[in-house]
Image (spheres, helix red, strand yellow):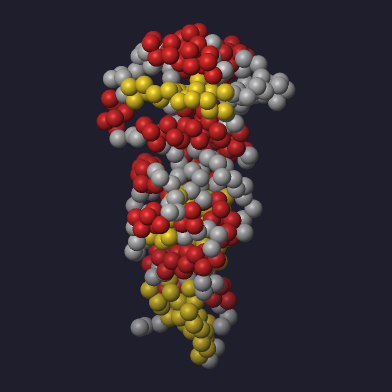
Amino acid sequence: MATTTHDTETEVQDRAILVSLVTDKIKRTGIDPELSLQELVQLAETAGVEVLDVLRQNKETPDSRWFIGKGKVEELRMAADGLGANTAIFDQELSGAQVRNLEEALDLKIIDRTQLILDIFAGRAKTREGIIQVELAQLSYLLPRLSGQGKNLSRQGGGIGTRGPGESKLETDRRHIRDRITELKRQLDEVVKTRELHREHRRKSGAVQVALVGYTNAGKSTLLKQLTDADVYIENQLFATLDPTSRVLQLPGSKEVVLTDTVGFIQNLPHDLVASFRATLEEVNEANLVLHVVDSSSLMREEQMEVVQSILQDLGAAGKPQIVLFNKIDLCQPEQLEMLPTGEGFLKISAFNEEDLSRITEIISDQLAGDTLIFRIPGDRGDLSSLLYRVGEVLEQDYDGSDVLYNVRLNKEDYDKWSYKLAEFVEPQ
């Protein structure tokens, strides 16, 4: 495996000018360039970059050689010289040739949005699965761009664009990279098989699954920690946690569900990253219920919600039952609160308010609840009694001779799953 010199050389902090190109195509797609640019500032700061200035350019189409055009490149060079910048970060993806041309003209390290996000992921991945996924995404991104990665790959020292796969071998050995990609895919397949076994075990055990989804930094990990006492990393930054964490959540009536935190979404999430993290993201498809966590204090709330719904659509999970949790209401201005939707399927909360946490568990319980049935279970069938407590909400129990009568609220999906064991014990209504 290739290694990086990132830890052995003295790091020079990246001092960057951010560059955004708005084309006619971007305007047609409905992507908000200002939202994207504000996120780029956050991404850069998350990566430890000092943002010096922002440069905007409007063109019908990207310049094939210079991306932003020769005149704008000269403007960027003068700005970099005047501010003492050593890096330029572009809000769109660049080709290898464009990177090479810009480096030669500017004598700066050139990073694009995708590489910046991959770099952040490289610093966040902790589990074996996460590390494999990130390296696979990095190598898949770099392979077609090797001819244009001169300074990024040969430059010694740390900083953005150098974490992960390494430098010298990327420059000299394409076959090594392809072989490494093949090996990483094989390892990831093993992880996927293990994950599927865990999913199958949860299905067979009757475990009800609830998935937390949302824009990055919406507060999903905080909510998981508050609801389940999970030991998860929490920080006010983008992509603070990458690896999905599942914990048991106790609902009213003693029923338990598995609550899973997923990686945060973001506008223009790199394709290679989505492909590498698909096995992780598809945990959402196994969920009985999706909790969409929204940062209600964000000025870009509606755009962020649209991005999440779009990615859920891509994953095939858009049709899942969903509750929208408008989080961080304690940070909202009064006029922001007034604009939040209300009614069934929406809940305004703060992850640090105990009453709100109780309301969340109640609404989950109500959403998952179904019909109320009475089961007559023989006294010697403790396995069936235990099953009822596990998959339903036992509202009442009584005794009739040697039998136990259970009044249970059970959703149709769970009943259908376990009807082969329970159907003969249902009392006529």
Quarter-wise, where is residue 379 in the image?
bottom right
Residue toward you, 86 or 202 = 86
Q: Residue at x 34, y 64 (%)?
A: 344
Residue toward you, 289 or 92 = 92
Residue 25 image position (x, y, % from top left): 29, 26
Quadrant of the rendering where the C terminus is positioned: bottom left
Residue toward you, 265 or 134 = 265
Compared with 145, 130 (above or below) is: below
Answer yes or no: is residue 323 visible.
Answer: no
Which residue appears farthest toward the right when viewing the image? Answer: 8
Q: Residue at x 62, y 59 (%)?
A: 229
Quarter-wise, where is residue 161 in the image?
top right
Quarter-wise, where is residue 382 in the image?
bottom right
Which residue appears farthest toward the front when viewing the image? Answer: 82
Number of numbered discs on residues: 0
Q: Residue at x 57, y 28 (%)?
A: 50
Residue 3 image position (x, y, % from top left): 66, 23
Residue 1 image position (x, y, % from top left): 65, 24
Which residue appears farthest toward the top when viewing the image? Answer: 104
Compared with 16, 70 (above or below) is: above
Residue 406 is left or right of residue 194, and the answer is: left
Q: Residue at x 55, y 88 (%)?
A: 402
Residue 403 image position (x, y, % from top left): 52, 86
